[in-house]
Amino acid sequence: MGLLPETRGRLNNAPSHLQTLKINTMIYDTESNKIISDLKDVIARYKKLSFTPDSIASGSVKDAEVLGCLISNYFDYDPEQIFEASQSAFEDVNYHSFNQEFQKIWHKELSKSDETYNK
């Protein structure tokens, strides 16, 4: 075959590109699942911290609401960063057309804010 004798065995034992891809995908999936599990734990903890036991028991507090509160808090209530996170989430689920409209509304809202502050 044209290969040096000392490399033949190593190449035969080396994982194929497909095997490497499969291993990397498994590592990614495992880590991704762990992160989601950790996030669910954080949401549950924050829900208990921020909402009344009655509202939690009634089921009126949804995880999406808690995550929204966490995101606001994480970004120190900065609307620009909250908008960017929202836009990234919609992009991730392929809501491209919606995102374009969302961006227009956002810029329109920013214009209103600028006009208010510049008066």
Image: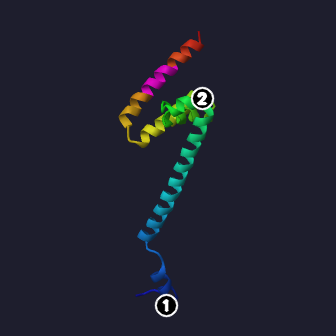
Residue 14 got which mark?
A: none
**Quarter of the figure with residue 42:** top right
Q: Are marks 2 and 1 in contact (CB under 8 Å)?
A: no
Whichever of labels 2 and 1 marks the residue nearer the N terminus, that label is 1
Density class for disc 2 (Cα within 10 Å; few <14, some 14-19, many ≥20) is few
Query: Which element type, helix, strand or loop, lies under badge 2?
Result: loop
Identify residue for label 2. Answer: 78
Q: Is residue 3 a member of the stretch shown in magenta?
A: no
Give the crowd class for mark 1: few <14, some 14-19, many >=20 residues within 10 Å: few
Find numbered disc 1 in the image and state the secondary structure of the residue it sits on: helix
- Foreground label between 2 and 1: 2
Picture coordinates of residue 69, whole percent (x, y): 56, 32
**Residue type of the residue flagged with mark 1:** Pro
The one of 66 and 82 positioned closer to us in this rendering:
66
Specify the segment rendered in magenta.
103-110
Residue 15: percent from the left, percent from the top? Answer: 46, 75
Residue at the spot 38% in from the left edge and 37% down from the top edge: 96
**Residue at mark 1:** 5
